[in-house]
Amino acid sequence: MATWRRDARVTAVQRLGCAALAGAVSLSLTAPLELLTVLAQVGTWHCRRGLRRAGPSLCRAEGVRALWKGNLTACLRLFPYSALQLAASRRLVILFTDELGHISHWRAIMAGSLAGMVATIVTYPTDVIKTRLIVQNRLEPSYEGIIHAFYKIYHQEGLLALYRGVSPAILGAVPFSAGSFFVYINLDKIWQEPIVHFTPLQNFINGCVAAAVAQTLSFPFETVKRKMQAQSPWLPHYGAVDVYFTGMADCFRQTVKNKGVLGLWSGLTPSLLKLTPGVDQSLRPQELRELKRLRRENF
């Protein structure tokens, strides 16, 4: 058990603003890697000769600015996603905390996962729009911008099209949260010293390892989600998706049938290089460390 404590040194608005700004800078710097990840997951022609040639091929075809397609949408999504996740997480933690102010690790993980799911569902249309903007040709666009994409998808394909792929996005939270939790509860065994004595470098390495493990475990769900988001009869070449399917289960089956099991992990390398979780629906690493530290203090 652990005791949940609020950090009174930073207000919720300040924490949210700092997280949004840091996230926007991080997303902008790693946008080319995110673009290569999405293109590899969808299976567009750029990646047929390997990821190393995908970037140059895209630049020759659409210009250097194409490497940042969809980045504005991703940055704009950060603030409402972070706000919703933070608000939902606080509410759920209070709900799962007992009368003594204690909360178990699994309840804390559940609170973080549920909060991430709430934020994902509410902001999911922006994720669909981001994928559509990435897979389209910048010089011959089907969508002229974020608002136009939202309007066109809604009127051509209906409201449900803006939530296409939400099922694997939510299901991917399970292996992601489990992977993160497994790493953080074993940090003292990995380093062979108490968690409270970790240096900043060790904490940085811990975050990278946890993100890599969690992202690898949840990546097949992320791949299927991207394929479902991109596939559309209103896009040239049906969204340029490398397999054709009728739903989530069929997408898994068709991908394995045509690309092999490893096809579910297409694009994992650039995704790991940027080390930003594909399904960000667990407690933050620092919160997991705090929970474990408080548990030790309570005992």
Image (spheres, rainbow, N blue to C red):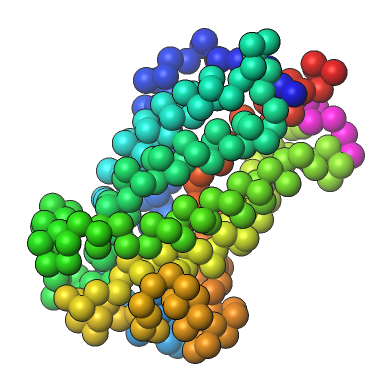
115 on left or right of 215:
left
Q: Is residue 35 among the parts visible in the rendering?
A: no
Q: Is residue 83 among the parts visible in the rendering?
A: yes
Quadrant where the C terminus is found in the figure:
top right
Please identify the quarter of the rendering in which residue 14 is found: top left
Q: Look at 66% across and 56% down and name the residue there.
A: 213
Report the front residue among 113 and 23.
Answer: 113
Q: Look at 37% across and 27% down and name the residue there.
A: 17
Quadrant where the N terminus is found in the figure:
top right
Q: Is residue 247 above or below residue 120?
A: below
Q: Is residue 262 above or below residue 67?
A: below
Please identify the quarter of the rendering in which residue 145 is found: bottom left
Instruction: Write the start and end of the magenta stretch as one range.
Output: 192-197
Asked if residue 194 lies in the magenta stretch, the reply is yes
162 on left or right of 260:
left
Q: How many marks?
A: 0
x%, y% of residue 283? 57, 36
Report the front residue among 254 and 216.
Answer: 254
Report the front residue among 160 and 108.
Answer: 160
